[in-house]
Image (cartoon, rainbow, N blue to C red):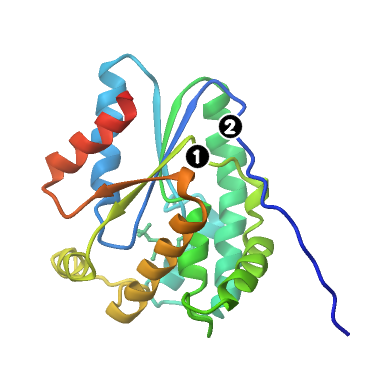
Amino acid sequence: MKYHIEFDIDFKRNPYKGLYIVLEGIDGSGKTTQVEFIKKYFEERGREVVTTREPRKDKRSLIGKLIQEVLYGQTGISPIAFQYLFSADRQMHHEEVVIPALKEGKVVISDRCYWSAIPYGLLDKEESVESGAIKRSLVAQSILSFYHQFIVPDVTFYLDVKLKTALERIASGDGAKEIYEDGAKLKRAIKGYEWLMKEFPKEFTVINAEQAVEKVTEDILRRIKK
Ligand code: TMP
């Protein structure tokens, strides 16, 4: 028996006095580096800043610890169950870190948020972003990631890099590779992000992350000042 379900996507906006900034992009796009520069900018202007990330790496975070083990291939888990872990970690992260900081008027700068669940969550599925099936997947994915429970960032910067650049940056890193740090997977993740930005254009500010680090920071800060 078939059931037809239709629903509107209603993002939960930040009702607090703090500012919620997120950096998104494929692995190797340079998000982590930029977080520190944005932090410095706000601190120099007397704002209190909380830098954070999804998934969490904090040893005290039970689920975050498990996610890191799967990312580094130390533990195996089904791809769908894996995305549920990200959602569970996200829920606790918002409750424990993001919301309290926003309530106190702080600037929260997060390396990834639930946007990542879509391009990465789709990686292990059959559907290609070119086919109409992605819409169905988004519905399934949205249930999976419970995105409507989470506050949407006030601004999301998408660090746009070519696959080749990202792979070069990953190769010059610390050597330990994560499961998604693979050319074919990241190529699909880029397509997932492109689709996401086409569907929700007002939620993303695209930054050319092929440029030198300082130029990327300059571009981000110019948009923040606006
Ligand atoms: P990174 O933040 O160090 O790049 O690593 C996190 C990895 O986890 C990255 O490959 C993206 C992936 N990921 C998901 O698959 N789902 C999610 O919901 C999030 C936040 C990240």
Q: Earlier in the sequence, mark 2 or mark 1?
A: 2
Mark 1 is surrounded, within 10 Å at the Cα level, by few (under 14), some (14 to 19) or many (20 or more) other residues, namely: many
Residue at point 85% right, 81% down? Answer: 2
Mark 2–mark 1 contact, CB under 8 Å?
yes
* Percent position of residue 151, x then y: 59, 40
Q: Is residue 155 left or right of residue 15?
A: left
Q: Quadrant of ligand 1?
A: bottom left
- Three-letter code for the amino acid on which mark 1 is drawn: Pro
Looking at the rendered image, the quarter that the N terminus falls into is: bottom right
- Residue 183 located left or right of residue 165: right
Q: Is residue 141 above or below residue 52?
A: below
| Secondary structure state at the residue bearing disc 1 | loop
Find disc 2 in the rendering and name its residue. Answer: 14
Residue at x-position 39% and y-position 21%: 48
**Please, which residue is most extreme toward the right here?**
1
* Residue 192, percent from left and from top: 44, 67
Residue 205 sits in quarter: top left
Residue 136 at what x, y percent from top left?
Answer: 65, 72
Instruction: Locate residue 149 relative to residue 155 in the image: left or right.
Output: right
Q: Which mark is residue 218?
A: none
Marks 2 and 1, how far apart in space? 7 Å
- Give the residue drawn at x 51%, y 73%: 122
Q: Which residue is mark 1?
A: 153
Give the structural element (helix, strand or loop) at label 2.
loop
Q: What kind of residue is marked 2?
A: Asn
Could you say where residue 111 lies in the image, as x and y percent from the top left? 38, 47
